[in-house]
């Protein structure tokens, strides 16, 4: 005799998943993988000054009245915009308002 689980999923008497259960598991795995592969752009104010420490890490100081979008999944590795790949530089902006930067980030997330 089989056992039923919420959502109509079932396992047979041997404990093996039925075809419907396997399909649901695969859909959930595909959905989780898709979430990991999506881009996650972030909005921040444009730093006034960038400097590199002895380990090669970029550090920002101050802020300007402009905004930028950065996306690590696009290869944006932090640091000044002029040191990024062309697609990352284009996404960076700068944008005049935070609203414009958020709009650009949302559009980027939808289109990737």
Image: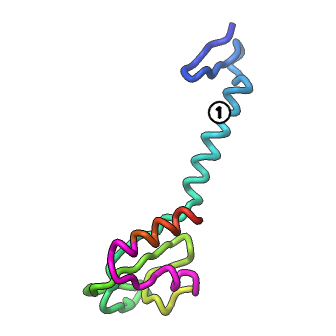
Q: Taking 31 as reference, is 18 left or right?
A: right
- Residue at 60 percent across and 53 percent down: it is 34
Locate residue 86: give its quadrant.
bottom right
Task: Give the image location of residue 66, x and y in percent.
Answer: 32, 84
Out of 91 and 4, give the one closest to the viewer.
Answer: 91
Q: Which residues are magenta?
A: 86-101
Q: Taking 84 as reference, is 8 left or right?
A: right
Q: Is residue 23 above or below residue 74?
A: above
Task: Give the image location of residue 111, x and y in percent.
Answer: 58, 65
Is residue 96 highlighted in magenta? yes
Residue density around tag 1, few if under 14, some if 14–19, many if 20 or more, within 10 Å = few
Locate residue 23: give its quadrant.
top right
Task: Give the image location of residue 35, x and y in percent.
Answer: 55, 53
Task: Give the image location of residue 2, x and y in percent.
Answer: 67, 11
Q: What residue did someone put label 1 on?
A: 24
Is residue 2 highlighted in magenta? no
């Amino acid at each position: 005799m089989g056992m039923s689980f919420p959502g109509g999923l079932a396992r047979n008497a041997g404990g093996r998943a039925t075809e419907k259960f396997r399909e649901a598991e695969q859909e959930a795995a595909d959905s989780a993988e898709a979430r990991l592969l999506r881009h996650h752009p972030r909005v921040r104010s444009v730093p006034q000054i960038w400097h590199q420490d002895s380990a090669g890490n970029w550090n920002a100081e101050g802020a300007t009245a402009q905004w930028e979008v950065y996306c690590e999944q696009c290869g944006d590795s932090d640091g000044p915009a002029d040191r990024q790949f062309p697609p990352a530089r284009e996404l960076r902006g700068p944008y005049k308002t935070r609203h414009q930067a958020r709009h650009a980030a949302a559009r980027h997330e939808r289109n990737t």
